Image (cartoon, rainbow, N blue to C red):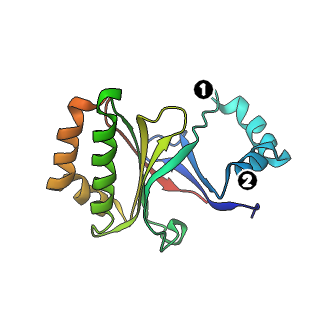
């Protein structure tokens, strides 16, 4: 309900119920900064401190490829989120970014896709986060097994600086 908030989604990792992700989208850096400085945000983070195994990790991103948000994920209780870290070695950054954006554009029309976004970390432009939302586990499994997604992962692997780190979540708010 804060000024400038476009989306605020909280998720719990499937299979590891003590891990969570918060995805926030803001109209501007100023709106996000106002949220971060708000008393309720500081109280929330202070309340997390005794539960954390490591420091609170916040990674601001900029959109590289974001399609329309036609249906809020919260309306689909069975939705599965995949949050994937994609790290491209600097010499292959442009190629890797273009491949990832192309894969997202193609995947948005796959059966069961609710949303598919590619974001880049503000502090490290060769690091991307891919956010996928699917109707259910069967839809995401079919997508992951598709020839196009397999080809993407095979081509990406030699230019990647880390493992293809795909994690699955369910929305909790």
**Horizontal side of residue 5 vs 94, given as left or right:** right
Within-10-Å neighbours for mark 2: few <14, some 14–19, many 20+: some
Badge 1 marks a residue whose secondary structure is loop
Q: Position of residue 28 (x, y in %)?
A: 67, 54
Task: Give the image quarter of residue 129.
Answer: top left
Q: Can you tell which mark lies on residue 86?
A: none
Q: Position of residue 133 (x, y in %)?
A: 41, 60
Q: Residue at x 31, y 31 (%)?
A: 163
Q: Which residue is mark 2?
A: 31
**Horizontal side of residue 66 vs 148, given as left or right:** right
Q: How many marks?
A: 2
Q: Residue at x 29, y 54 (%)?
A: 102
Task: Give the image quarter of residue 51.
Answer: top right
Q: Position of residue 134 (x, y in %)?
A: 38, 62
Question: Is 5 placed above or below 128 here?
Answer: below
Q: Which residue is mark 1?
A: 53
Question: Is 46 placed above or below 64 here?
Answer: above
Depth check: 65 or 169 in front?
65
Q: Residue at x 22, y 51 (%)?
A: 149
Badge 2 marks a residue whose secondary structure is helix
Q: Residue at x 47, y 40 (%)?
A: 16
Nearer the observer, disc 2 or disc 1? 2
**Horizontal side of residue 157 vs 81, given as left or right:** left
- Residue 122 visible: yes
Task: Give the image quarter of residue 27.
Answer: bottom right
Quadrant housing the C terminus? bottom right
Give me the C-alpha separation between circle 2 and circle 1.
29 Å
Quadrant housing the N terminus? bottom right
Within-10-Å neighbours for mark 1: few <14, some 14–19, many 20+: few
């Amino acid at each position: 309900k804060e000024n400038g908030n476009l989306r605020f989604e909280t998720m719990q990792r499937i299979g590891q119920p003590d891990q969570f992700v918060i995805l926030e989208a803001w109209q501007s850096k100023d709106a996000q900064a106002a949220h971060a400085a708000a008393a309720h945000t500081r109280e929330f983070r202070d309340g997390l401190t005794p539960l954390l195994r490591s420091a609170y990790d916040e990674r601001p991103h900029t959109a590289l490829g974001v399609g329309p948000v036609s249906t809020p994920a919260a309306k689909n209780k069975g939705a599965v989120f995949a949050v994937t870290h994609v790290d491209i070695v600097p010499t292959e950054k442009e190629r890797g970014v273009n491949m990832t954006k192309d894969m997202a554009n193609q995947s948005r029309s796959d059966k069961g896709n609710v949303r598919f976004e590619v974001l880049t970390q503000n502090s490290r432009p060769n690091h991307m986060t891919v956010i996928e939302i699917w109707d259910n586990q069967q839809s995401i499994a079919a997508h992951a097994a598709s020839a196009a997604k397999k080809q993407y992962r095979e081509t990406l692997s030699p230019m990647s600086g880390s493992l293809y780190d795909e994690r699955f979540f369910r929305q909790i708010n």
